Image: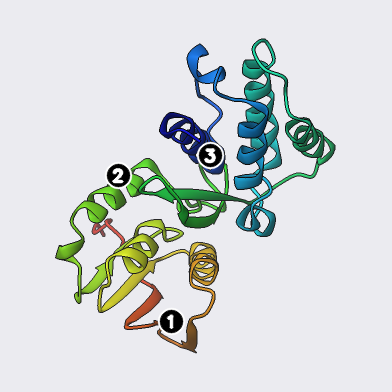
Amino acid sequence: MSNLENTILVDLARKLFRGCTNFHIEPDSVKLMTWSWQELFVDLTLRSPVIKKYPISTELSRIFLKKLINCIEPVQEVHDNLYAELCRAMNNSAIEDYCYRHYVISNDLNNIITMKETKNMVVNGTTGMRTWEAALMLSDWILCNKELFSSKDVLELGSGIGFTGITLAKFCEPKSVTMTDCHEDVLQVLCENVDINFPSQCKNRSSDGTTYELDNTSFVPRRHPRYDNNHGC
């Protein structure tokens, strides 16, 4: 596979993993989406071990695959596996309260942060149940400045479901990461996301939170109190 073919594959895989359906494919790129390219794309995405274990939204998969097939059909023969995955997505009509999104780090499909989250803006009175663009931008800055966090104790206030803290713990070698939020449902999903991304960690529960021992890094999701800004009588 040429560098350009690989770049196109990784770019589309990133969009699919994140549930992004707003994408454009240049005509010259479609010419490179041969039968073998399409087969590899399906194998590395929808049929990969991580997607089988933590599937992305079937609704977003359906929209993505329809758009991809519509781009390929006028130029190339569409691979049977793409049609099979589209049929699979169309046949699954279950209502999804949560789904999984997978965030590719440094354009490497082997470096993925998997997040359980919701597609909704607000759930149970909180906006903390999804990964927001600000978390992605902050994580990108952190990855560009890893040396600032190496061997440091890091406290994150308002961690939400944990993307930034998990990214930092996974790639920056801090001494410890303490993540906090005030909503119990958010903390529950945060702990699930830590379990997903660090499946072999040692875990200890206490009244202060759950402590995960990740090699040389200790990792603690905790509840912080709500603050009331109303000081009147």
Return the residue at label 3.
Answer: 13
The mark lying in front, picked from 3 and 2, is 3
Tell me if I can see residue 226 in this picture: no
> What number is the disc on residue 212?
1
The mark lying in front, picked from 3 and 1, is 3
Of the pair 59 and 230, the residue shown nearer to us: 59
Image check: 159 left or right of 101? left
Q: CA distance from mark 1 to mark 2?
A: 25 Å
Q: Amino acid type of disc 2? A: Met
Return the residue at label 2.
Answer: 137
Tell me if I can see residue 69 in this picture: yes
Of the pair 213 and 112, the residue shown nearer to us: 112
Task: Name which of mark 3 and mark 2 comes first in the sequence.
Answer: 3
Q: Residue at x 27, y 56 (%)?
A: 229
Mark 3 residue crowding within 10 angstroms, few (<14) / some (14–19) / many (20+):
many
State the SS at label 2.
Answer: helix
Mark 1 residue crowding within 10 angstroms, few (<14) / some (14–19) / many (20+):
many
Q: Amino acid type of disc 1? A: Tyr
Task: Name which of mark 3 and mark 1 comes first in the sequence.
Answer: 3
Do residues under tags 3 and 1 come within 8 Å of each other at their CB atoms? no
State the SS at label 1.
Answer: strand
Q: Amino acid type of disc 3? A: Ala
Image check: 15 left or right of 78? left
Mark 2 residue crowding within 10 angstroms, few (<14) / some (14–19) / many (20+):
few
Residue 83 location (% of width, % of height):
78, 30
Q: Residue at x 70, y 32 (%)?
A: 62
Of the pair 160 and 218, the residue shown nearer to us: 218
Q: Residue at x 28, y 78 (%)?
A: 176
Please determine whether, in this image, residue 136 is positioned above or below residue 153: above
